[in-house]
Image (spheres, rainbow, N blue to C red):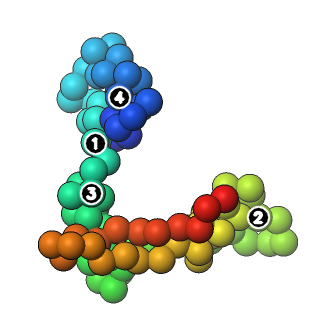
Amino acid sequence: MVLDASGPGADLASRLSREIGPTVVEPYLFTVATMSRLTYHLLARVPSGRMHMWTETGTYLSPETTEFWSQVTTVRPVLRTGNQRGFSAPKA
């Protein structure tokens, strides 16, 4: 399990790692560099067909699906100094 270990998530990631074990819990520290690396990895998987988004059928879309697609369609890529990539989203 990968947990956000930046900011408020650090305490939870640390406690879960102690309780469940470091082989199960992987704390992930979000920084400009790690976010850039994650962005490049995700973008590389899209055209190769190794990343797929789920599809719900019927007329009902779950709140999670609606929120996911809302965020995906409003976020914009950002190229930072040092060829680092990131995302920018409008303020809620």
Amino acid type shown at disc 3 = Val
Quarter of the image for the C terminus: give it. bottom right
Image position of 80 with respect to 25: above or below:
below
Amino acid type shown at disc 1 = Leu
Q: Name the residue carrying label 3.
A: 32
Q: Earlier in the sequence, mark 1 or mark 4?
A: 4
Question: Which of labels 1 and 2 is toward the front?
Answer: 1
Residues under numbered marks 2 and 4 in contact, where contact means CB atoms less than 8 Å apart: no
Amino acid type shown at disc 4 = Ala
**Circle on res. 10:** 4
Residues under numbered marks 1 and 2 in contact, where contact means CB atoms less than 8 Å apart: no
Question: Which of labels 2 and 4 is toward the front?
Answer: 4
Question: Which of labels 4 and 3 is toward the front?
Answer: 3
Question: Which of labels 2 and 3 is toward the front?
Answer: 3
| Residue closer to the observer: 48 or 5 | 5
What's the distance in space between the residues labelled 2 and 3, CA to CA?
A: 33 Å
Q: Earlier in the sequence, mark 1 or mark 2?
A: 1
Secondary structure of residue under mark 1 = loop
Question: Which of labels 1 and 3 is toward the front?
Answer: 3
Residues under numbered marks 1 and 4 in contact, where contact means CB atoms less than 8 Å apart: no
Secondary structure of residue under mark 2 = loop
| Residue closer to the observer: 57 or 31 | 31
Residues under numbered marks 1 and 3 in contact, where contact means CB atoms less than 8 Å apart: no
Secondary structure of residue under mark 3 = helix
What's the distance in space between the residues labelled 1 and 4, CA to CA?
A: 8 Å
Q: Residue at 84%, 72% (x, y): give it.
A: 59
Q: Earlier in the sequence, mark 2 or mark 4?
A: 4
Residues under numbered marks 2 and 3 in contact, where contact means CB atoms less than 8 Å apart: no
